[in-house]
Image (spheres, helix red, strand yellow):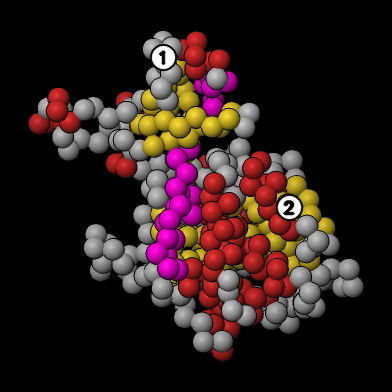
Amino acid sequence: MIPDYQKWKEVLRELTSCLALSGYEDSVIRYVKEKLAGKAEEIGVDPLGNVIARMNSSKMKDPYRVMVFAHMDELGMIVTKIEEDGFLRVERLGGIPEKSLAGTTLLIEVDGKRWPGIVGTKSHHVTRQDEKYKVLPINETYADFGFRSKRDVLAAGISPGTPVGYARQFFDNGSIVFSNTLDNRVGCLALLELADRLQATELPCELYIVFSVQEEFNLRGVLPAIRKVNPHLAITLDITIATDTPDLKGSADIRLGGGPSMGMYTFHGRGTLGGLIPNPKLVRHVQKIAREHDIPLQQAVFMGILTDASFSQLENDGIPMIDLGYPARYTHAPVEAVDLHDVEQLICLLEKLVLTCDHRLDLSRG
């Protein structure tokens, strides 16, 4: 199948234009439900917001259940206090890189109205020498949305607890796309395209395509969906850190245009320990499918990165699980970058992989 990159760019532009921070994913929920209409036997939204689409189950007895999932939410900030002169104090909602914040353009949406703003930064002309290379922690910054008073802010419907996102941006150079929130709206694009390709295909398994919530907040929003589906096998789609930029060359061998990624090890040593070491037999099976279809596969090992797989793998009796994804530059920054060639090959890999999943697939340990 020849991909329509222009169509993909339009879908991705629409997805990234949605402001949908963790816990506030409703705009993306509505979008994916509309796109999935008619392509699944059942589409539901659980109380937490996970969108669960069930495919190819009406004729199956004791089906082998496969779940492919990607998170809808984005990271950002949340209003903690409104100053009397109209400035906003904010706190992180997800892994915001504080080194990138000064001068960053922002967006608030309340009742359909959007308010653009900026993270305040001290004017260069009056910045002392000892401050020029200092990164302020987020609780020492402020946001300026052009309001003149606290009363004006409250009248706009903004109050403590209001989510604040990065400003929306989208541009491209051929297959390379730059945008806010490509983590993980590219994963959502891949799921939508996978549903398109498989909707008329008789599958050997019962397929669940799931769009999850609150990954950037605590990695656990997908758990109700995992418990409901109780998959025999699960695949999560998310970013992998591209290391092909001048500042990261040599740290790993992950590059844009090098093909989809397969997570071999993820771990986060701070706070609640989490991560994924994938099922070894599943790793070999994915590698086999990739080789058979000439799909390049970049193997990724990273400290400090987590995905929805981190805790969901531990549900029910334990679930064989693997991280598949796409390389991305500038992760968690206001603008990220991906190559649609990698996304195309990821979707092809998923399509071929799903067609091999049934009760004969041995993922047992020992």
What segment is highlighted magenta in the picture?
157-182
Q: Nearer the viewer, residue 22 or 310?
A: 22
Q: Which residue corresponds to mark 2? A: 34
Q: Could you say where residue 362 lies in the image, as x and y percent from the top left?
A: 67, 79
Q: Is residue 237 visible?
A: no
- In the picture, the quarter occupied by the N terminus is bottom right
- Which residue ends up furthest to the bottom in the rendered image? 292
Task: Give the SS element for disc 1.
Answer: loop
Name which quarter of the figure residue 201 lies in: bottom right
Q: Nearer the viewer, residue 361 or 182?
A: 182
Q: Which residue corresponds to mark 1? A: 148
Magenta stretch: residue 51 in it?
no
The answer to whether 258 appears left or right of 228 in the picture is left
- Which residue ends up furthest to the left in the rendered image? 129
Q: Is residue 175 above or below residue 118?
A: below
Q: Residues within 10 Å of mark 2 (few under 14, many from 20)?
A: few
Magenta stretch: residue 174 in it?
yes
Q: Could you say where residue 233 lies in the image, as x and y percent from the top left?
A: 67, 68
Residue 325, label in figure: none
Q: Nearer the viewer, residue 335 or 131?
A: 335
Q: Amino acid at mark 2?
A: Glu
Q: Amino acid at mark 1?
A: Arg
Task: Give the SS element for disc 2.
Answer: helix
Which residue lies at the image location 54% right of the left edge and 46% below the top edge?
17
Q: Could you say where residue 217 lies in the image, as x and y percent from the top left?
A: 53, 41
The answer to whether 203 appears left or right of 265 in the picture is right
Q: Nearer the viewer, residue 271 or 74?
A: 74
